[in-house]
Amino acid sequence: MEPVTWAIHKYVMHGFLWVLHRDHHDHSIEGTLEKNDYFFVIFALPAIALMYFGWLNDFNYLFYIGLGLALYGMTYFFVHDIFIHQRIDFLKNSKNPYLLAIRRAHKQHHKHLGKAEGECFGLLWVPIKYFKMYFNKDKV
């Protein structure tokens, strides 16, 4: 799912659906919800539909594809919204090198306010330089 997530983030969210994703970068809205949060529904609907039609057909492959999408969506929510953006105080002071690397890469992504500029569009796998920053700290 990571390559698909990267492509959707770069070409859809920073492309023709920038109108929904923009407030996630410029923080132009006050409150807890952003237009960007509509992506939760946009991405959940195919997962629900696939699970439903797979269930109707004796749990065929469609169900498991939908389940995989749903599980990745839950992972995305926990990593992106809870861990990275701290919508809930959880793992705020983590020392885990992997978690610190993905948090740092996401901060680099957010330093760009426009839709055209950008880097680090992935979630669970980011450029190796961020991993090197935290995994090699003790070796210096």
Image (cartoon, rainbow, N blue to C red):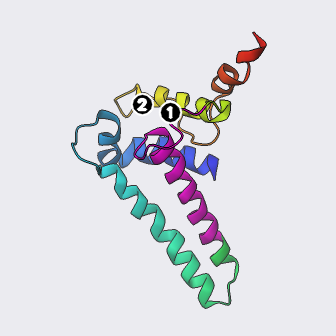
Residue 62, position as x, y percentages in the image: 64, 77
126 inside magenta stretch: no
Residue 124 falls in image quadrant: top right
Q: Position of residue 74 (x, y in %)?
A: 54, 59
Residue with the mark numbered 1:
106
Residue in view at x 28 percent, y 36 percent: 27
Residue 19, relative to residue 28: is it above or below?
Answer: below
The local secondary structure at tag 2 comes to: helix
Q: Which residue is drawn at 29% across and 46% down?
A: 19
Measured in 3D between alpha carbons, the distance from the residue under mark 1 to the one under mark 2, in whole angstroms, is: 6 Å
Q: Relative to residue 107, is residue 137 drawn left or right?
A: right
Residue extending furthest toward the right: 139
Q: What residue type is labelled 2?
A: His
| Residue 100 in the image, given as x and y percentages of width and height | 59, 30
Q: Mark number for residue 110?
A: 2
- What number of labels is visible? 2
Q: What range is drawn magenta here?
A: 65-94
Q: In which quarter of the image is residue 133?
A: top right
Name the chief secondary structure element in magenta. Answer: helix
Q: Is residue 110 above or below residue 9?
A: above
State the SS at label 1.
helix
Contact check, label 1 and label 2, Cβ < 8 Å: yes
Relative to 49, is 125 above or below?
Answer: above
Q: Which of 64 and 11 is in front in this view?
A: 64
Q: Specify the amino acid type for callout 1.
A: His
The image quadrant that residue 37 belongs to is: bottom left
